[in-house]
Every structure is written in structure tokens, then in C-alpha cells.
Image (cartoon, grey):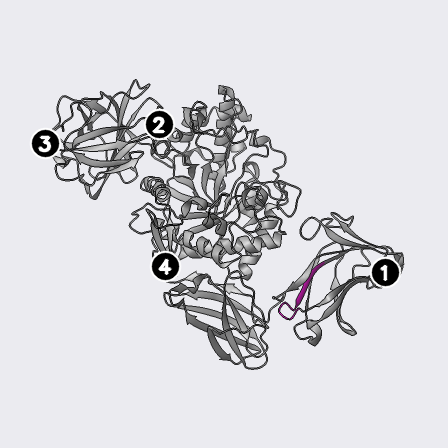
Amino acid sequence: MTALSHVASSANAPSTPYAGNRMAELTTAGVPGTSWRSVYRDFSPALNVSSVPYFHGAFNTYGIDASNTQFEARITFYSNSQTFVSTQAIQGDRWNELSVDLSGWSYRTAITKIEVAYRSVTFATNWAGKHQLDNVGFSAYPAVYPGSIGQATASATQIDVFGTYATSSSAQLDLIELQPYEKYDMTASYTAMATQSVAPSGGVASFTLSGARYGGSRDKVYSKFVVVDHATKKLVASPTYVTSQTAPANAYAFPTAASIKGLQVQTIDDAQKLGIGHAALNVAFNQLFVDSAAGAVPFVLDGTTYYLNASYVAQLDRDIKTLSDEGVVVSLILILYPGSGTITAKLTHPGFSGSGTVAAINVTDADGIRYWKAGMEFLASRYTRADQQYGRAVNYIVGNEVNSQAYWYDMGSKTLQDFVEQYARAYRIAETAVKKYYANGRTYISLDHFWNGSVGTDALRTYKGKALLDEFNRRIRAEGNIPWNIAYHPYPEDLFDPTVWNDTTATASADTLRINFKNLQVLTGYIGASDYLYNGSKRRIILSEQGFHSLSNSLADQKTQAAAYVYSYYKAKFLGGIDSFILHRHVDHGQEGGLNLGLWTRDPTKSAASAPKDPKYIYDVFQKIDTSESAAVASFAKSIIGISDWASVIPGYNAAQLADRESPAAGALSAVGSIAPSLAVSGFETSSDGWTASEYATSVATASSFANAPGIPFAGTRSLEVTMDTATAGDGVGGARAEKGIVKTFAAPVDATAAPKFQFAIDAYGGCPGATQYKVTVRLYSGSHVLEGKATLTPNAWNKFSMDAGAWPYKGSVDKIKIWFSTDSTALWNAKYQVDQVGFGA
């Protein structure tokens, strides 16, 4: 050897380090290729690898030619004069993963030197080659196991681990429980959770090891399990986690939406007007917990009481329930923003660099894991209930764009393998929590649009999406396969250029630099490989974040944005294998680096950075893209894209399949001189009669007098009064323009056939700053069918309204009613309105 270098690249394939940013490279003199050329390292003090007896490393060498393809690597371990030698075949121009088992070497307690040597087996001519070495070290786990675990299941009371062990003699096997962050140590003493004596048949013994699921109040379903040969203390199979739970709290069918159309929702009233089928909401774990019990929501896990932020939970309840009650499939994005406080510190990964927008979850110790478990169990138990008391959320996205972890899941500098090991641990805990409460709940890994490329050059901070997904799949399969899924973000290659159809770095190759809407079929095709399947089926894909920039927000620029949306929506819809297309953003945001991705422009005069101002051109397109008006509303986009027929750029396009959703039917809501409801009447004399606050109403209560004129109920002695305030309806949702709603859901649908006129009286405060109109909207529901009527009202007076549903085909089964109140002003306004004598009349 003539030199040992620390390099970032090599002349031979694959030219990049096995892991991280650099590798060791040996340069040798021109000696016969069959001669060994070596490098070594001395250790003082000597290494004791008794607890980590398996040596692993990645080895590469220059190839020579097609006639000389056999190479060897020799690894020699020294304990002073004692040696242990392993010679293994390797291939040139590729990384070779080698492993050496030192568990049976008596001198592994005092290793003083390790030497690595390379040679060609056949090339005797002088050869001045180069050789690379990377990612070397010791592990508690071997590369290959003598057995395997087929499944680990958890019933209500028991955990069962099933597998096989290749052995020529009878053996006693021990089942040992480890915490997720612990590694097995063959030199340590453990108390077995279960034992079994097995005898081989044909050289293979089958085992079933069973133990109690609960240790006191602690649920072991999150634990890691190892099966050990009692005599040798060696692992029989790879460590595993529970892969299925047979007694979840709920097992109802997964909800379905009318279409794939979705939105990262900012204003829940507008989301309903847009007719979305899917919504994504952030859950910030740094806001979820509080330190004390005062005013908090308590939650008990493993015998410990945790306290949740009551106001934050109430906001989640409002948004999730309002949306899911409308038939929207809700996805929660589970993220941790950097912050202060003892609980946030426990949840923040110790490797967090401080520069990322989002921090990685700490799963390296007991405190981090218990808070992560508690948060996940709280969310899953609350939002997957069969009765939907707090609303329903069935999708859980773990982190954000984790392949670009430097920015969106900051764990500090980590090799791809180390990062995935810890991310997969957090992911598996989330999956286990969701499945504990809902058998059909789904969890997702979040990836940006980089595939065979990355956002940065530091291989310890950003990773290629394809490489990360491959490593994630490998690790999950090794530790017990579970039904993980993908939340992908196929943004255009340039976020400031929405013309995704022109992107050049999105190609049809599996090695494409990035995957976006132009080549989305690469992703759906790639996960069809056999080693990616779960029980024979593909992993599910949702497109949980993507948006299109409207540049200056001129009409022309807004049309280009809308054209990009149409192109992308049609690509996702007709490709197949895409469960949802969730657009980002709802409203332009002033702190998003200059991007204007919203359906609304923002109002820069307001306190909120994304206060909605005016709907853009894309608004109407988005609203109608999944209805019978889809082709008409999308027609403008063809000339912008440069096509005359959608089928030329959208494989499988079929105009007859565009109408997935029925738009609300238009009802005539009219002011009338008198009302006389006789069916399903709410007079509010003794109670609110099942009417509750919805959207941005703060509360409802019956009242006998009011501050606004005329100050008395419309009829009888009490009316229902609805409170609205700036804390609930602030700048971020449109202030007084936001809908403040009330809703009633009927236990048994109302048949309004004989009394089809929906009638009610409404009064409201006046004096809203800047308001010229006060508005009321009524929605009658029959399943997914909606009749909607709109009108204006006069404040400080009882207004009587009637909407004739006689021509509506679904009047015979009305199961829900909503009444909305708003103004045409975006001012902040604390006010109230009242309703009375609500019901159906002839």
C-alpha cells in the first residue's frame, strides 16, 4: 500500500461512499494482482467486543477486466499474538457487505489490531489498483440468522411469537423482551418472558413462545422481542416487534370519499364549500402536552397520567369532527416543531441540530418513547372511536419529508442506515398505537419529490428518496413486516414554475432524479416489486402535499397555476393506485419563501400571514374538478399546456369518469311573511334540542333575552343564541366572513315529504365593521346528498325564511341540518345571533 486516503468519491463504480459523505481508499503499488495489499488499525486499550461480537463492513475494489472478476478480502483480528482470519470473496466495482462472527473466539475480549487486505484471485500481472472501505464496526446482531420469526401477534392478554430454528439437536429457547431502544447483549442476564424446549425434524425446529401482554399496567405491545438459544445465548432470529393485533378497540370499515380531491385545510367552512373528500391537518406535538393537570385533558398510559393541552385538543376536535362529519377522510400529519419546555425537550431527538424547521422524534430513551406513545395513543383512541364523538381521523403521517431530514425531520448528521433505524422505530410505535385502537387505520412515511437525487449534497443530512425507501422497507421486513404506506409530495421540479409538464428531471426511468406528476407512474410501478408487497398487495399511496405557484397572481399566472392543478389531478385520478391528492395550500402564505400556492390570495394587512383575501382562478376549478362540470371548467388548461386532447398527456383519460362527486343542489331560501313549522320543530323552550356549535361558532345556549334588537325570542320564552368571537374566528379564517354554524344530526332521518318547506327565524347583531351584507346559508343533508340555500338578512330584527325542498329527491330522509351565519367583512367581530322555531312546514 502506498497511501490511505479519506475521499468523497472514487474512479471505480459506484463511485460514492457506501454510507455518509466519505470512505477510506487504499492506493497500492504495481505488484502482482494476486498479492495481498493491506491496511490496519491498532487499538489501545484493547477492544472488548463480547457484547457486540459481529464485525460488519462494506468493501469495494477496482475491477480489472472481463477475464479477471474474482477478488478476495481478508479480515484479520489480532489479540496480541492470537489471530482470527476471515477470507471472503468480493466483486469489483460494487459495495460488498461482509460480516465476521467472533462470538466463538475466546480472545474477542482483547482485540489489539484489525487488518483488512485485498487481492485478485486470478490476475498475476502487476496491478496498481485502488480499494475502498466504509461503514466498518461491531454489532450485537449477525448478518445471517439460523432461524426466522414468521409472526408476532398480540391478543387482548397474550403475545405469541412463531418461528423456526435450523438446528441439528434439541434446544431450549428463551423469549426475551427488550425496550425499542435497547440492543440484545449476549453477555447480560435476562429474565425470560417464556421458554420452550424444541426438537428438530429434518434439521428444523418450530417454536411458539407465548407470554402475558401486560406486565402490571404496562402494555408490552410496543416492545422488541428476541428469541435466544438458552445454551449458546445466541440469537435464533432477527429481533422482532408485534406485527398484528387481534383485539383492536374498533374494526369498522375504512371510510371512503367520493373522489381523490383533498386539501391541507386552513378554513373548515370553505373546505366544505369546496367539496373536498380528503383533508390533511397538522398535529404539533410541541403543543399537545402540558406540564400540569390544571385545565388539561388527562390521559392514562401504562399507569402514568399525561396531560394534554385542552385548548389545542378542542381545536383539533372542532376541525376533525366538522370535516369527518361531512364525509371527509382526515389525515393527521404528526410533527414536532422546535420549542421550549420540559416535555418538548423529552420529545426532541438528541441529535437535533437546531437548524431544521421540524425536529425528529426522540426514540433513543424511555422518556422520549413514553411521550411519543402517549401522544399517539391519545390521538388514535380519541379520533378512531366508533361513535365519532370527537370526529374521525384514520390516516396518520409520521413526520414530514424525512428524506430531506436536515429541514423537515432534523436528527442531525446520520448515515442513511442509522437514520432509518431510528425513524422506523418511531414509525412502528405510531403504527402499533393506531392498530391498537383501529384495525383498519393507516400510517404513512412522508417523502418529498426527490427520488434518485436529494435536496442537498451532505449525505448525512439529506438522502435519495429511493434509497431511503429501500432501506426503510428492508428494515421493516427484517423486524416484522407491517402495512406501512407512502405519503408522497410530487411538487414540480422548480417550485416557482408550475408547468410540471415541461419538467426535464422527471423521466420514465426508475432511476429518475425526481418523481412528480409528469412521471408519477414510476412510483406506483416501483412499489409493485415482490419484496415491497404486504400480504400480496401494494402499499397504499396518498399525495399528501403538493402545490402550484401562481407567480405574480396576475390572471394569466393564476390560470397557469390552475392548469397545473388540472393536469396533475387528471394524472393522479386516471393512473390508479392513488388514494388521495391533497393540495397545499388553502391560502397563500406570506412566510413561504415567496411562493403563492393557495386557492386564495392573502391579505397582507391582517395579522395572520395567511389571512384569506380573494379566491383565485383555481378556486372554481378546484371546486368543480370532480363533478359533472369537470371537463368544462378544465377546458381552458389545454391551450396553456399546448394540447387539444387530454388523452395525449393523460393515459387512461375518460371524460365519462370525471364526475365522482355530486354538487349540492341549489335551493331557494326566501324571506317570508310568516312561518309555521309543524315537523321536527325546535322551539328551544327547554333545551338546545340537539343543536350544537359548528365551524367557527364558539358556543350555543338557550336565552330569554338578547343584547340586540328586538331583544326577545321570536316565539315562546326562549331562543337559541349562538356566540362568535375573535379567538375562534380570527384573521386566519376570515374574521366575520367565516361561517359560524349550528348543526343538528337526527338519530332517525326526518321524512319531510308531507311538510317539505324548511323554515326558521333568525336575528343577529348588527354593527360589524365594514359589513354591507349579513348572510345566512342553510344545508339539508341526506347522506352525501345536499340541498343548499342562501340569502341575506337584516340584523337587529327577526327574519323569517323558508326553503322549499319539495322538488329535492331526498326530502324523505333528512339526517342533518346546518345553518351558517356570516358577513361580507373580514373584520374581527365579537357578536351573537339567534334562531328560533326551526323545522319543516307544509
Q: In this rendering, is residue 434 above or below 271?
A: below
The residue at which mark 2 appears reads as 735
Q: Disc number at residue 33?
A: 1
The residue at which mark 4 appears reads as 248
x, y percentage for residue 757? 17, 30
Name which of mark 3 and mark 4 comes first in the sequence.
Answer: 4
- What kind of element bears circle 2? helix
Q: Nearer the viewer, mark 2 or mark 4?
A: 2
The residue at which mark 3 appears reads as 716
Instruction: In the displayed orientation, state which residue is furthest to the left.
Output: 716
- What kind of element bears circle 1? loop
Q: Residue at x 35, y 50 (%)?
A: 293
Q: In this rendering, is residue 1 above or below 159?
A: above
What's the magenta region?
49-58
- What kind of element bears circle 4? loop
Name which of mark 2 and mark 1 comes first in the sequence.
Answer: 1
